[in-house]
């Protein structure tokens, strides 16, 4: 069930985080910590929560509806007036835009209803999932923000902060450390004509640099320019001649992939891209070796062999929205072309993707035990 009221959604999220029930004070604290609503914009934000609980509970006099209908969301656990609330239904879901479709347009409100994050800021880390949403538009030009594609896969994004030199704190720090903290970065570009946001893909940080730009008062200051590359171009365009692809030892491949994680402060894009490509090659080959010639989803033998006499499987990046990161061996699966298309385009893509995640998790646990 989905409710268009942001306060209702945030209260549902908060109570779910409290394992289905909590006092008003618990709920206030959870909503405050989630930071999906800017509570400073409200004279009495706690009153907003109370009002919307009362309006959506048949235990209250101001409830408008019939007991048990779609608006009867909350119930008083210990009786009216005790201040302890739970969800009437065990599983109440807000709308989901997952799986995200490349180049599809979304309302910004729908993006946040599904993924969380601050609704006003350009850099919006989510408390619901380990993701960081970044929003790009032309309006930032007046504040020295000039984002844009350098080619088909490289995107430059200016940090946040409208006055004074930009610093690595809050959203800027989150982007700088997104790989270390296993946070996926999703890019949305605004269509200035209709106000919708187009999903452009998942990014990985290459590096950053400082440049001079005016602040909102016209004063020249230092801004941070993040340099990103699309994940797909990293994982799926690994040079087949890469020497790493000739290795077949799981431990060696895993070590190569994780070893590259330690060098994160490179400024030179060319050198950074080389490191990323080496890691991507190790991750790709790791998944193929782990699969042993069988699809890691349907478990059928690869449909054919390549010219190099290798079983043909495609490496799929798992949309985890959980712990881990886009560039870790545990977050890819070697699957057949049919399962790969299903994971991206079917009407059960989310459920199907989650089933692959569960299978890879079991495989990885077994590998770790054997080692």
Image: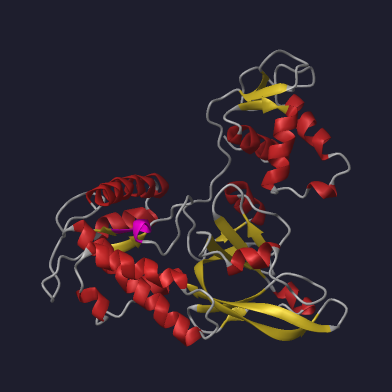
Asked whether, in this view, residue 172 is left or right of residue 304, the answer is right
Image quadrant holding the N terminus, namely: top right
Q: Position of residue 344 (x, y in %)?
A: 38, 57
Quarter residue 4 falls in: top right
The correct choice, above or below, for 39 with respect to 76 in the image is below
Asked whether, in this view, residue 356 is left or right of residue 12, the answer is left
Residue drawn at x 24%, y 62% is 250
Judge whether residue 283 can be spotted in this image.
no
Asked whether, in this view, residue 45 is left or right of residue 74, the answer is right
Asked whether, in this view, residue 175 is left or right of residue 166, the answer is left
Residue drawn at x 75%, y 21% is 83
Q: How is the image coloured?
A: secondary structure
Judge whether residue 67 can be spotted in this image.
yes
Residue drawn at x 34%, y 45% is 358
The one nearer the camera, 310 or 191, is 310
Quarter residue 108 falls in: bottom right
Q: Position of residue 46 (x, y in %)?
A: 81, 36
The correct choice, above or below, for 28 with respect to 234 in the image is above
The correct choice, above or below, for 288 with respect to 229 in the image is above
Chain part drawn in magenta? 329-333
Q: Position of residue 181 (x, y in %)?
A: 53, 59
Q: Position of residue 60 (x, y in %)?
A: 76, 18
Magenta region includes residue 32: no
Magenta stretch, main secondary structure, is helix
Q: How many marks?
A: 0
Residue furthest out toward the top:
79
The correct choice, above or below, for 177 with respect to 126 in the image is below
Magenta region includes residue 332: yes
């Amino acid at each position: 069930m989905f409710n268009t009221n942001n306060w209702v959604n945030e209260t549902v999220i908060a109570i779910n985080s409290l394992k289905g029930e909590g006092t008003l004070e618990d709920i206030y604290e959870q909503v405050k910590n989630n930071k999906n609503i800017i509570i400073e914009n409200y004279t009495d934000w706690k009153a907003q929560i109370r009002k919307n609980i009362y309006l959506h509970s048949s235990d209250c006099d101001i409830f408008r509806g019939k007991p048990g209908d779609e608006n009867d969301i909350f119930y008083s656990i210990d009786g009216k007036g005790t201040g302890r609330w739970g969800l009437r239904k065990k599983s109440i879901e807000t709308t989901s835009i997952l799986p995200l479709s490349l180049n599809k347009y979304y309302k910004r409100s729908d993006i946040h209803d599904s993924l969380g994050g601050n609704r006003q800021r350009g850099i919006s880390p989510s408390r619901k999932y380990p993701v960081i949403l970044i929003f790009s538009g032309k309006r930032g030009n007046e504040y020295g923000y000039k984002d844009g594609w350098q080619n088909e896969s490289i995107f430059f994004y200016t940090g946040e902060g409208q006055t004074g030199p930009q610093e690595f704190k809050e959203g800027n720090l989150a982007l700088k450390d997104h790989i270390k903290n296993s946070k996926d970065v999703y890019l949305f570009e605004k269509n200035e004509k209709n106000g919708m946001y187009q999903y452009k893909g998942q990014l990985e940080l290459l590096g950053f640099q400082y440049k001079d730009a005016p602040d909102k008062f016209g004063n020249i200051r230092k801004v941070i320019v993040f340099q990103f590359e699309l994940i797909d171009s990293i994982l799926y365009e690994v040079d087949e001649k890469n020497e790493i692809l000739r290795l077949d030892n799981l431990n060696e491949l895993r070590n190569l992939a994780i070893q590259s994680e330690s060098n994160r402060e490179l400024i030179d894009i060319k050198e950074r891209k080389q490191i990323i490509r080496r890691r991507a090659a190790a991750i790709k080959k790791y998944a193929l070796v782990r699969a042993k010639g069988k699809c890691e989803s349907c478990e059928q033998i690869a449909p054919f062999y390549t010219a190099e006499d290798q079983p043909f499987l495609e490496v799929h990046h798992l949309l985890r929205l959980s712990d881990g990161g886009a560039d870790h061996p545990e977050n890819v699966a070697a699957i057949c072309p049919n399962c790969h298309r299903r994971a991206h385009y079917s009407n059960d893509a989310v459920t199907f993707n989650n089933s692959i995640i569960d299978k890879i998790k079991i495989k990885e646990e077994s590998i770790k035990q054997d080692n």
